[in-house]
Image (cartoon, helix red, strand yellow):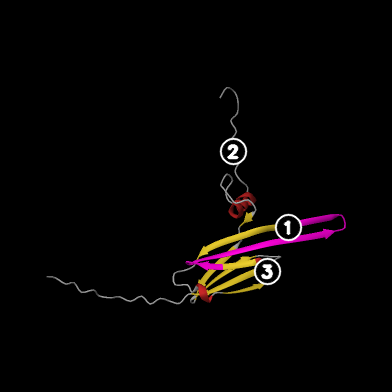
Amino acid sequence: MNGMIERLPAWPTLPELFGWVETGLPGTHTIPGLHTIRIEEDLTDGTYVLRAELPGIDPAKDVEITVTEGVLTLRSERSEETTQKHHTEFRYGSFARSVRLPVGAKGDKATAAYKDGVLTITVPVPETKTGTRTIPVQHG
C-alpha cells in the first residue's frame, strides 16, 4: 500500500437507512419527483385495511385510488405554500404506491376515508372455503 492508509467506506447512519427505505437505495433508478407513500397493511376478519400517511392534502381533489387485476394503486399530489414575514416555503410532490391485494379481495367493493392526515382504504376479503375432494381413478 506504499505507506498510504486505505479508507473503507463509511457505514450508513440509521437516518440514512430509513431514508433509503423511502427513496430507494443510492444508485438505483427512480422517477424524479415521484415519492413513495408510507403505508400500513392489516388483514383480519375478512377485511383488508391499508392506511396511508398523506398529510396536507385535499382527499376530494388530490387522491386517486384504482384497483386493476388485483393491484391497488394509490396516487396523490400535494402542493402547499407557507408564507411568513420574511420567509416563503413551497412543499409539493407526486406520490404513488401500489400493493397486491390478498387473493379473493373484492376491489370493486373497496371504500376509503380520510381523517387527520391518514387515508384508510378497506377492502372486503371473503373467506374461501377449502374442502377436500376425492378424485376417483379410472382404469381401463
Q: Is residue 10 above or below residue 117?
A: above
Quarter containing the C terminus? bottom left
Q: Which mark is nearer the camera, 3 or 1?
A: 3
Reading the image, the residue beneath label 2 is: 9
Look at label 2 and name its amino acid. Answer: Pro
Residue type (three-letter) at the residue carrying disc 1: Arg
Residue 115, by quadrant, is bottom right
Bin the neighbour count of mark 3 within 10 Å (Cα to Cα): few under 14, some 14-19, many 20 and up.
Answer: few
> Which residue is depicted at the point 20% across and 74% down?
136
User: Label 2 vs label 3: CA separation?
Assistant: 45 Å
- Is 82 located above or below residue 9 in the figure? below
Which residue is at 68% across, 69% downward?
A: 61
Q: Earlier in the sequence, mark 1 or mark 2?
A: 2
Q: Which residue position holds label 1? A: 91
> Label for residue 139?
none
Q: Position of residue 96 (x, y in %)?
A: 60, 60
Over which residues does the magenta segment extend?
66-91
Residue 87, how many percent across, how many down? 84, 55
Identify the residue at horizontal 61%, vertical 55% (top origin). Answer: 22
Label 1, secondary structure: give it. Answer: strand
For the view shown, which residue lies furthest in the left direction? Answer: 140
Which labelled disc corresponds to residue 61?
A: 3
- Asked if residue 76 is among those painted magenta in the image, a careful observer would answer yes
Question: Looking at numbered disc 3 in the image, what kind of residue is underneath it?
Answer: Lys
Q: Secondary structure at mark 3?
A: helix
Q: Quadrant of residue 82?
A: bottom right
